[in-house]
Image (cartoon, grey):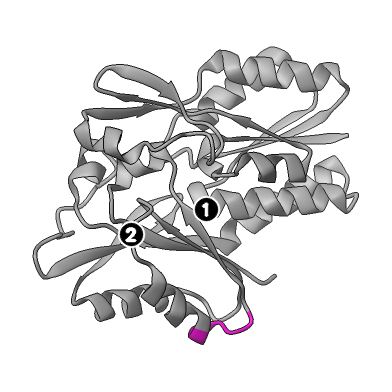
Amino acid sequence: MIAIVTDSSVGYSTAEIADRGIVSVVPLNYSVGGATFEERASDKNGIFMPMLRKGPCKTAQPALNNFIQTFSSLVAKGCEVICIVLSSSLSGTYSSAKFAAAQVGGKIRVIDSRTIGAGMHLLVDEAVNLVKAGIAFDRAVEMLEALKSKIGIVFTVETLENLIAGGRLNTTKAKATLNNRPVFELKAKIFFKCNVRGARERLEEMLACIPENTRRIIVCRCGESTDVSALSALLKARCPGVYIHQRVLGPVLSIHVGEGAFGIAYIVKN
């Protein structure tokens, strides 16, 4: 049997984890005001945004022992393990999982997703579908490595403070002022695309990044109150045959992008 391990930035709910059946989720860590928490399934993190506003906030990769325990348990059951984690360019989670796999032994393959959050959600869903279709371990890994290049994220933020504080912003060109907002793309790491003046213009710039052959889309937002209705409507008009999934970011990614941020994760056809 093939089991899939991922990290909590995937954003699955408890019901989604149960529905997939073969997925184990290792929690990322975050701290607020010196108190440390583990990120859980999307419906188990409570109302965290008011707490994050108080700060100061930090995030951390999963504890090494969490990966070791998860891998050990699955290998003991006779499972082959595919572990899909957030981009190694943005987190040490990949290195931690690789080290744990080497310590445990058995047939474990750790995949650097080269994406985060909703993008990883798309890749893990593909892994689940491959396993349920009966694809053999080595072939499934090969196909997932190829699928990574077909996933992208475009996003925007209301403030640059969070990206700067987390060390994820590597340009001075991005601006978040009264009239301007930055647009970024994520392919392994964060790339600044442009600054845009005006709300409608910002949405149109983001839509221009979505390929015509997109087959699945997730609209994600930071904070329940962040309004993405206009973005969703424009996406439906641009991609009429594609269902638009909606997601709210968990605490770890919220710490890095800040309240009011929103984006689009997509996967294109083969």
Closer to the chain start, of discs 1 and 2, is 1
**Image quarter of the C terminus:** bottom right
Q: Nearer the viewer, residue 173 or 32?
A: 32
Residue shown at 27% from the left, 29% from the top = 57
| Mark 2 burial class by Cα count in 10 Å: few <14, some 14-19, many 20+ | some
Count the labels in the image. 2
Q: Nearer the viewer, residue 95 or 180?
A: 180
Verify whether residue 105 appears in magenta. no
The dominant secondary structure in magenta is loop
The Cα–Cα distance between marks 1 and 2, rounded to whole angstroms, is 16 Å
| Mark 1 burial class by Cα count in 10 Å: few <14, some 14-19, many 20+ | many
Above or below, 41 against 145 in this view is: above
Q: Quadrant of residue 149?
A: bottom right
Classify residue 138 as left or right of residue 113: right
At label 2, which amino acid type do we have?
Thr
Above or below, 56 against 166 in this view is: above
> Which of label 1 and label 2 is nearer to you?
2
At label 1, which amino acid type do we have?
Ala
Name the residue beneath numbered marker 2: 226
Classify residue 232 as left or right of residue 145: left
Magenta-tinted stretch: 237-241
**Image quarter of the N terminus:** top right
Q: Nearer the viewer, residue 186 or 118?
A: 118
Classify residue 257 as left or right of residue 41: left
Q: Residue 213 at x, y = what percent?
A: 60, 78
Q: Residue 84 at x, y = what percent?
A: 63, 39
Determine the secondary structure under disc 2: loop
Name the residue beneath numbered marker 1: 118
